[in-house]
Amino acid sequence: MRFNPFKPKNGNKIKITAINLKYNGEIHSVEGIEASGKIFTVTVPFTNRPYSNYLTQAEIVKASDFEPVSLKSISAGEPFKVVAVEPQLPRKIGPEERVEFKISIAAPDYAYSGPMMLEFVEENRELVHLEITSIVVNAMGRSATAESTINMFNVPKNHIFQQNLQLLKVLDYGMKVESITIDKPFEFEGSLPKLPFIVNDASSFVVAVYVKAPDINYAGPMTINIK
């Protein structure tokens, strides 16, 4: 994400050490900026993708497989306040559409050094509550509980989220992975490395799996099957 601060000639010095972007319960931290004056702006590129903003390789789901986002508002945490957004909100953003939001922010009336939070809020959208107690991986006749970075969170119905798996316990060098499935109520949407792949170096043991959430609340294990 790119940030372009506008720096008026007069006013208190504002040093933002980090900009935290909150969206759908997740926070992404990016580098800060320095500005001065009562009003400054940042430009935030927003792309409607159902998977992590950090995905840099070819898309793994088709644009037709997910819905537009209706972004309702962008707000700033204290001591800042959003005074204007261009293009104006609410704004519908289609699958894979990229919109650059220019956000005008009122600074405090004193010098400030520290982080700033910007929260992106969608129009009312039904959420499901997920409590994943463990992630069980079945692979090549082996079964193990994988290291997990998620446990309890809320996501929109049928939202696609990323789960990173460390698979040292179930894979060996030279193994070829041809398919991945996930037991209901979840669905497998894709992976990095992309299927099929061979475990040929240390990084091959770490797999990013893209999971489609159910349309109902769920508490229990997630079972991933690798062949």
Image (spheres, rainbow, N blue to C red):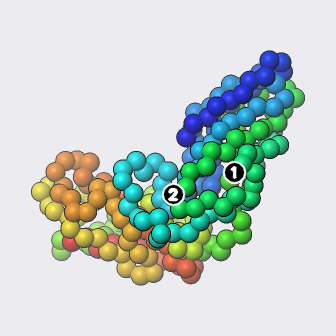
Considering every residue shown, the one lying at the far right of the view is: 109
Tag nearer the camera, 2 or 1 = 2
Residue bearing the label numbered 1:
119
Q: Nearer the viewer, residue 76 or 169?
A: 76
Q: Which mark is residue 93?
A: none
Kind of residue at disc 2 = Glu
What distance separates the C-alpha of mark 2 from that of mark 1?
Answer: 20 Å
Q: In the image, is 10 to the left or to the right of 113?
A: right
Q: Vertically, is 43 above or below 221?
A: above
For the point 41% across and 64% down, which residue is it?
A: 61
For the point 59% across and 70% down, which residue is it?
A: 156
Quadrant of the frame with the C terminus: bottom left
**Label 2: element kind:** loop
Q: In the image, is 124 to the left or to the right of 37?
A: left
Q: Nearer the viewer, residue 215 or 142?
A: 215
Q: Nearer the viewer, residue 38 or 79?
A: 38
Quadrant of the frame with the N terminus: top right
Query: Can you give x and y, in whole percent of width and height, for residue 66 in the image?
Result: 51, 69
* Other-residue count near label 2 (Cα within 10 Å), few / some / many at <14 / 14–19 / ≥20: some
Residue bearing the label numbered 2:
96
Kind of residue at disc 1 = Glu
Considering every residue shown, the one lying at the far left of the view is: 174
- Residue 180, visible in the rendered structure: yes
Q: Vertically, is 137 above or below 42?
A: below
Residue 206 occupies quadrant? bottom left
Query: Can you give x and y, in whole percent of width and height, for residue 32 in the image?
Result: 62, 31
For the point 21% across and 59% down, which residue is it?
A: 197
For the point 24% across and 52% down, which residue is it?
A: 204
Q: Earlier in the sequence, mark 2 or mark 1?
A: 2
**Label 1: element kind:** strand
Query: Can you give x and y, in whole percent of width and height, for residue 101 in the image?
Result: 67, 45
